């Protein structure tokens, strides 16, 4: 039986945010790449890490005016344990605004070089972890912050270490 792989383009940013525009956004390539990387992290915050058989990657898309990047889910149906449909539905719904995944509005204007991307994303995820952290009683407000915080902590341990250097926040 042949391996069944297919992809789903999830967009490059939350649907109601002003995304980077080819020909209009200064440092478009860097900003668009950062935007897609953050959107991938935000989707993981909302949906959790991908189950076996699904991977999330940044995809370069050629356009007449230049290349732009989006988040793409690559799906191997042979590895579906029954969780793919629900996970993909959550991804496809996406988020409308950064704050729905616990992220502050990103300050893309700070980016001037591609070697800043990894640190920029780590800082943004660390900020989202601080924003969604539990109270001193261990409860989350709003309640939706709990799953986001746990998903980001599990998927981005380096950002969790950056957010809470002494490991002071249980989740």
Image: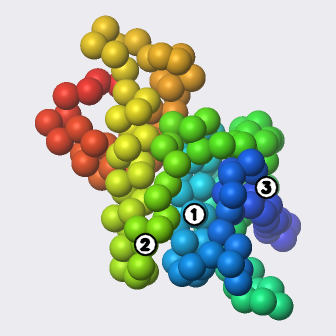
Q: Is mark 3 on a helix, strand or loop?
A: helix
Quarter assignment of residue 150: top left
Q: Which of 15 and 125 is in front in this view?
A: 15
Residue that extends furthest to the top in the rendered view of this protein: 137
Please tell me which residue is depicted at 49% across the width and 54% down the height of the picture. Answer: 106
Q: Distance between the residues labelled 3 and 2?
A: 38 Å
**Quadrant assignment, res 2:** bottom right
Q: How many labels does the image show?
A: 3
Q: Check whether the beta carbons of the residues at disc 3 and disc 2 lie within 8 A of each other.
A: no
Residue 21 on image: x %, y %: 70, 73
Q: Residue at x 14, y 36 (%)?
A: 166
* Camera-nearest label, 1 or 2: 2
**Which one is earlier in the sequence, the residue at label 1 or at label 2?**
1
Q: Quadrant of residue 87?
A: top right
Residue 48 visible here: no
In the displayed structure, would residue 51 be above or below residue 12?
A: above
Q: In this view, does 43 lie above or below 54?
A: above
Q: Mark 3 or mark 1, which is nearer the start of the sequence?
A: 1
Residue 123 in the image: above or below residue 37 = above
Q: Mark 1 or mark 3: which is in front?
A: 1
In the image, residue 29 sits, relative to residue 149, either above or below, namely below
Left or right, residue 151 beside residue 61: left
- Mark 2 crowdedness (10 Å alpha carbons): few <14, some 14-19, many ≥20: some
Apparent side of residue 133 relative to residue 87 in the rendered image (left or right): left
- Residue 98 at x, y = what percent? 59, 44
How many angstroms separate mark 1 from mark 3 (CA)?
Answer: 28 Å
Q: Could you say which disc has been placed on residue 35 in the image?
A: 1
Q: How far apart are marks 1 and 2 (CA)?
A: 11 Å
Asked if residue 137 shows in the view, the reply is yes
Rendered image: mark on residue 77: 3
From the image, state whether disc 3 or disc 2 is nearer to you: 2
Per the rendering, the mark at residue 111 is 2
């Amino acid at each position: 039986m042949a391996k069944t792989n297919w992809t789903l383009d999830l967009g490059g940013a939350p649907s109601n945010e002003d995304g980077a525009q080819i020909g209009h956004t200064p440092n478009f390539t860097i900003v668009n790449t950062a935007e897609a990387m953050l959107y991938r992290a935000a989707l993981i915050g909302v949906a959790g890490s991908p189950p076996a058989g699904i991977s999330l990657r940044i995809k370069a898309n050629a356009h007449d005016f230049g290349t732009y990047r989006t988040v793409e889910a690559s799906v191997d149906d042979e590895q579906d344990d029954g969780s793919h449909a629900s996970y993909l539905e959550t991804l496809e719904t996406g988020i409308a605004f950064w704050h729905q995944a616990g992220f502050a509005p990103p300050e893309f204007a700070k980016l001037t070089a591609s070697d800043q991307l990894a640190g920029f994303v780590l800082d943004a995820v660390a900020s989202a972890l601080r924003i969604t952290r539990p109270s001193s009683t261990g409860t989350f407000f709003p309640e939706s912050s709990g799953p986001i915080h746990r998903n980001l902590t599990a998927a981005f341990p380096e950002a969790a270490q950056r957010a809470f250097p002494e490991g002071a926040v249980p989740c």
